[in-house]
Amino acid sequence: MKTTHLLLATSALAMSAGAASAVDLTFVSWGGAYQESQLKAYAEPYMAAHPDVNIIWDESSAEAVAKLRAMNEAGNLTWDLVDVTVSDSMRLCDEGLARPIDGATELAAAPDGTDADTDFGATRVNECFVPQIVYSTTWGYRTDLVGDTPPTSVCDVFDLAKYPGKRAMQKRPIDNVEWALYCDGVAKEDIYSVLSTDEGVARAFAKLDTIKDQVVWWTAGAETPQLLADGEVVMGSTFNGRLFSAIAEQNQPIGMLWDMQSYDIDGWIVPTGLSPEKEAIVMDFLMFATDTQRLADQAKYISYGPARASSAPLVGKHEALGIEMAPHMPTDPANATNVLHYDYTWWADHRDDIDAKFQAWLAQ
Amino acid sequence: MTDHGAGDAFVLFERVQKSYDGETLVVKDLNLSIAKGEFLTMLGPSGSGKTTCLMMLAGFETATHGEIRLAGRPINNIPPHKRGIGMVFQNYALFPHMTIAENLAFPLEVRKMGKSEREEKVRRALDMVQMGKFGGRRPAQLSGGQQQRVALARALVFEPELVLMDEPLGALDKQLREHMQFEIKRIADGLGITVVYVTHDQTEALTMSDRVAVFNDGVIQQLAPPDKLYEEPENSFVAQFIGENNTLEGVVKEIRNGVALVELDDGELIDCKPVNVSRPGERTRVSIRPERVEMNKARLQPGAHTLKAEVLEFIYMGDIFRTRLRVAGNDEFVVKTRNAPDQRRMQPGEQIEIGWLPTDCRALDA
Amino acid sequence: MSETTHAGPMLAADGTPLKRSLARALRRQKLRALALIAPLLIFVLLTFVTPIVSMLWRSVENAIVPETLPLTVEALKDWDPTRGELPEEAVFAAMVTDLQAAVKAKTHTKLGTRLNYENPGISSLFRSTGRNVGKWDLAADGPFKEKLIEADKGWGDIEVWKTLQRYSGHYTAGYFLNAADLENTAEGIQLRPEEQRIYMTLFIRTMWMSLMITGSCLLLGYPVAWLLANLRASTSNVLMILVLLPFWTSLLVRTSAWKVLLQQQGVINDLLVWVGLVDDANRLVMINNQFGTIIAMTHILLPFMILPLYSVMKTIPPSYLRAAKSLGATNWTAFWRVYFPQSVPGIGAGSILVFILAIGYYITPELVGGTQGVFISNRIAFHISSSLNWGLAAALGTILLSLVLLLYYVYDKIVGIDNVKLG
């Protein structure tokens, strides 16, 4: 069944490729090392096998929802495959801007025959979203500026007496208010019910107030490694892959703090409204790029965990550095002892409200 | 008025030099004294150093060497605004954001003069140039001639003893320019002020000045009253620059009794007044004014040298006739004759003889 | 010639009235002129007027509610929220009918997002209900009041219905109220609670900091423009290249360079510590605050001040200053009374240019503004690309546009808009 489907898709592709010469596809991603890893692990092998397909990259994932909405309003779709975060995929799927994808027929099964939906498990958050990687927002610290007792808990961020100096935090409420409540004594499972009350929000901000004048707020993931490298901050949150490259590739004196790392997932969505020819190629690519081996391959270039369970054992060594990548994955059991699973649904409801309060709090 | 000793000079340039780049001199060793009440014009082609001299006097340029004195006082180190010299600029430089009256009041205001006195002086100055009705206008609302008058009034309103004018009539049309020449002269004489006037227009210089300093190449070529300058140019540059002039080239044969015998390049001989030639064998350039050439042989002195000439062109100009001749190989030899009843109109191709008084023919430097 | 001989209109040579003949001759010229500017006119209409009109429209537009829930909106008209009771069964039934259609059209979550701006929680209410409601049979499964509340207890919250009723019109002032830190409550329009007020602070800060930036651009740019206009051509050309150099460098690179210079472990602080002016423990905070924003933006916008100033100063002949000095004015008086007034049009043009660019800038404030140096445009960008609350972004944009027009008007009254020129 699956083989026939693959055959059909490939022959359709061959026919369309025979009819028209080269096909240009626009893939949207985040730029930087991450996009590079997608190029190396997925796009280049695919283009090598399909010389008629030419993939062009657009680094607009940060505005994916806004731009897809605008394209939809204007009736002029110029994107073919878009890399988005979970929360953005929810909005796009809800509004019908992303196409539902059938895990049983349109995605590759695991080598042992497990169907894709089971293999992806919880990471396949909605029917439009094809997960690629699990990444986390977590903390790094300057090993030479924290003395003999490096931080072991996220709550050390709030301990100015023990770890004086500036902290870099992302300029958004998500993660920060959760950490604040957790360190104010709220049990992990109660965080969102506490945050649902005005008192809970006030409590989170009150906790953040204790370090507010020591915080440098960042908006781009590259800022924290730079701030750490310059010695501008003692510790800072950012994406774990950024910290990995600062530590392993640039040999900066930085240590990782995995405690209460906040998981997020990145994956593909296919915009609705593609022409049938293009959709056939995009779906063929998607099946290829999200199979077990390809997801494991991506980990050769960047320290983000493959979203398929079956890929984890296949994670090998870093392409250039030759170090084992498994211990640097956020999903590695040693790193995942205490994880914050941030609640997409809750944030979908409360993001505007909390964000307004967060901005007002910042401006005070 | 021709001979001013340094002692009673109102303005004095002493061995003044000016260089902008440290390599060439724009003004070379200038010595000039100007008497109180004199109208002196600096005349010369552009780049001759005349404007630089004016700017040094005004204080906008500093002399590289030498000293400039005003009423006996060295002014090299006095900034322009303390020199008390009125100045009229080429494009008038009326302040466009002020009314005419405000423009005139400006020099009085910066001198902290009281309001009523100021207004009175402004009114009088405007009346002097017949611009009394225009005090409330802006410069842009006036014609060129009117702006000129206002610029003059502004330069005079604070009663300076010395007024500098830098080609003030350059932007006006011919008729207005001639009118303003007399106007400026009248006002300057009436107030008894000293004027240093810069122009490249020789007619203007001759019309207005007590004395004219002809500049070329950073040097004063001749400093003289207009009549003397025209009739007795001291070198061939002045002869060429002032008025129309015919030149013939040749070699001095002999100088005797104040008369130089010159052999022209085609071998003919003429008598001239030796001006800056001193010995036989020297090359010379002979200068004769077109109106001093005589074509009627009967009117020449007996025994005077004559030259053969061929008429090339005859132009009727109303008050005068202008005849172009070929003389001693020179095709541009011009003769001007008065349109008198007895004056014959020459035909091109006619062969005639011309001559002149030896005193009208000046043997100058080659 | 007397008037009486021409009682009728003046006639052209062929007997047609002169006025008509003239109009015809001119019309051809006008049409040709119009054809020549047509491409520009269409371009301006499409790229400038249309977006502005669309922005104004979006800031009040609310059609999604009545269009997605037509029956509910109609049914809710008679409901009196002040009695403190939930609406009747008819309203619930209308809601289920509307929701079924909306789920089919995939518009129910969009509506949820829209209403969520006014009442947090509605977004997931619509999403979760959407999953159930599709399976219900309209005829057989009633009554729906209990059924809906059972599906999601949010439907039992009277505030949800109040929000629905308040925002059921085709147009809404909600975005503007929000943009002005106001809210529409049962007691009428009120200021938001203090911990939610942000936009007025940002508007005032944007205006204030843009003025500071304009002022510092003027202070730094005026002497440079003067030098440019008065130096020898060869020297001023080199200077001009230096002035334009920032244009050739990426904005991000320039902003990052300022970070390297100004941060606490940065070049300037290192230098000050090394010289001994600043204690190592008390390094100056010069970035991620208003100071850093003003410095970085002044640097970026400086050419926009210098160029108009330069082109105006270039037209001021040096003879004016000389004339003033010859009339007895000191250097300062000559500058202040004669040169400066004539450079005012350049100051006006440069200041308007810099100010308007400054209030719309958001990349630099975002990168070096920290918490105290961000502008209203950062919030607009956030609502456009991140929170997707385009209505609020449009309302904020409209207010910003009105403020600029207001300032323009004030400028016109004080200085005069004809007193602005670019050369």
Image (spheres, coloured by chain):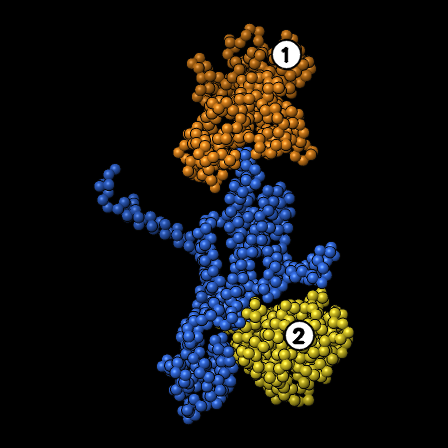
Chain colours: A yellow, B orange, C blue
Question: Residue at point 64% right, 43% down?
Answer: C234
Residue B97 is situated, as x and y percent measured from the top left of the image, at 47, 41
Q: Residue furthest bottom?
A: C140
Q: From the viewer's perspective, is residue B214 above or below residue A290?
A: above
Q: Is residue C401 left or right of residue C88?
A: right
Q: As displayed, is residue C97 above or below residue B356?
A: below
Which label is found at residue A68?
A: none
Query: How far across and how far down the image is residue B238, in percent?
Result: 59, 22
State the residue position of label 1: B260
The residue mark sitting in front, 1 or 2, is 2
**Above or below, C11 relative to B184:** below
The quarter of the rendered structure image containing the N terminus of chain A is bottom right
Residue at disc 2, secondary structure: helix
Residue that label 2 marks: A158
* Quarter of the image where the C terminus of chain A is located: bottom right
> Does the image show residue C52?
yes
Mark 2 surroundings within 10 Å by alpha-carbon count, few (fewer than 14), some (14 through 19), many (20 or more):
many
Answer yes or no: is residue C267 visible: no
Q: Position of residue A256 (x, y in %)?
A: 72, 75
SS category of the residue bearing label 1: strand
Position of C139 with respect to A135 (left or right) is left
Left or right for B342, reference A88 = left
